[in-house]
Amino acid sequence: MPSNRKERKPNLYIVGFMGTGKSAVGRSVAQRLGYAYLDSDHAIEESEGRAIKDIFESDGEDAFRAMEKRFVEEGHPAEACVISCGGGLVMQPGILDSIRSKGLVYCLLASPRTIYDRVKGNDKRPLLNVTDPLARIEELLRSREPVYRSAGTEVLTDGRTISDVASHVARVYRAEARSWGEA
């Protein structure tokens, strides 16, 4: 018997620290679900016409965080979209509640060593342009971890392939999307 009930397609937000696989996993999940894909950092770079690193250098972190907030408020579709969020996006007051109201949130987690191994040598990470990037990763993770762990469904990425993580996220999303928004 056919159902007249509209299939729920809430957005799927992927959050977590840099180097946890948000972009690669997000692209793969979007493909599996047949959804549009956006990366908040890339969307901001495109709208600003310059790299995140240049925004940080010329305008500062506060200006970049304001751009992230604007992206969350008005820079993406209302449904059927996978959005990989910049690592600091959910640290801003009110942003996590805002994305939760728009869809389901999945937080990718990895150890500091795994993150370091994945991002070392990448000069496009302005927060890691320091003498000891591993120590900076550990410091940032200590301050961000409580928010990350409260964001939504946690998914560990250490020692897992992009395909494995994406399959897991897509499977859990399909189950959770059926009841999303019901109080």
Image (cartoon, rainbow, N blue to C red):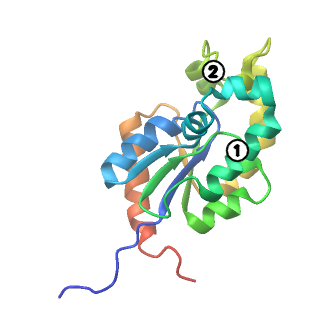
Q: Is residue 5 above or below residue 21?
A: below
Q: Position of residue 21 (x, y in %)?
A: 51, 35
Identify the element where label 2 is drawn. loop
- Residues packed near mark 2 inside 10 Å, few (<14), some (14 to 19) or many (20 plus): few
Q: Quadrant of the C terminus?
A: bottom right
- Residues packed near mark 1 inside 10 Å, few (<14), some (14 to 19) or many (20 plus): many
Q: Quadrant of the N terminus?
A: bottom left
Q: Position of residue 4 (x, y in %)?
A: 28, 87
Q: Which residue is mark 2?
A: 124
Q: Is residue 100 above or below residue 25?
A: below
Q: Nearer the viewer, residue 47 or 73?
A: 47
Q: Is residue 24 above or below residue 171?
A: above
Comparing marks 2 and 1, which lies closer to the viewer? Answer: 1
Q: Nearer the viewer, residue 89 or 133?
A: 89
Residue drawn where x is 78% and y is 25% of the image: 58
Identify the element where label 1 is drawn. helix
Q: Which residue is mark 1?
A: 67
Q: CA distance from mark 2 to mark 1?
A: 18 Å
